[in-house]
Image (cartoon, rainbow, N blue to C red):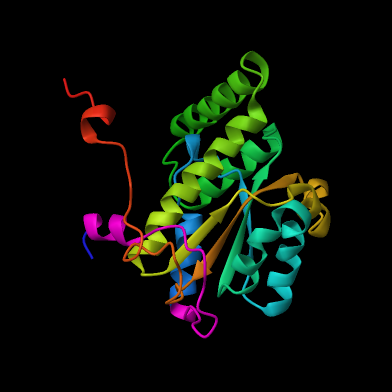
Amino acid sequence: MDLKETLNWRYTTKEYDTTKKISEADMVQVKNLLRMSPSSVNLQPWHFIIAETKEGKARIAKGTQGFFHFNEPKVTNASAVVLFCSKIDADDEYLKHVLAQEDKDGRLPNENVKNGLYGAMKAFSGIHKYDLKDLQHWLEKQIYLNIGNFLLGVASLKIDATPMEGIDVKALDEEFGLRAKGYTALVAVSLGYRAEADFNSTDKTPKSRLPENELFTEI
């Protein structure tokens, strides 16, 4: 598919075909999409919990109890579910950890480049921590960059997806001990293949977007 076809093909899947599973080869590409997403100053402030087993999906489904019960079948019937988790803080130890990996991967040819990148990481994280006082929110923004990249990427593999903010993040933080590890759950994304009966599929329900003349100012 070209880009236009991919954009028109993908939608938020409401019902999954439980007989279809994502191949091991495609799951390798799914994980690569998650790892290779862009983030501000390459901060990568994320962790991903990936459930493909019945038991694993049941654990994530603990975040769909009560008010969010309508999302439970989107978790349990999917082929896989990715729980996107955000770092709560980005302290100097973490910045140096990322920098050390970049150095190991050959991205830093000399000390000047290394010091420059470290300075940029310190500056931007410092602005959000001390001046704007929105560090955790800024870290979460990087997760949403990843999710946007991820949804288009899996669509290019002809894998359907359902992004869900409708989850009990406190329950999931407790289930996976995330806060003690410096993370918090943010969004779950189910993956799999649409059921024929899914009312929301694009062949039954056309996409709707605001018109170009309302969205774009070309100068």
Secondary structure mainly formed by the magenta segment: loop
Position of residue 82 in the picture relative to residue 60 (left or right)? left
Image x and y of residue 22, in percent:
48, 78
Q: Nearer the viewer, residue 25 or 104?
A: 25
- Residue at image point 83% right, 48% down: 180
The residue sitting at the bottom extreme is 19
Instruction: Describe residue 203's horizontal placement relative to residue 118 as left or right.
Output: left
Locate residue 136, reporting x and y percent.
Answer: 66, 32
Look at the image and say whether residue 20 sits in the magenta stretch.
yes
Left of 116 or right of it: where is 140?
A: right
Q: 186 above or below 71? A: above
Q: Is residue 60 magenta?
A: no
**Rendered residue at 43%/61% (across/down):** 200
Q: Nearer the viewer, residue 9 or 143?
A: 9
- Quadrant where the N terminus is found in the figure: bottom left
Question: Which residue in the rendered view is the most extreme toward the top?
Answer: 131
What residue range appears in magenta? 3-25
- Percent position of residue 14, x then y: 51, 64
Front-lying residue, 21 or 97: 21
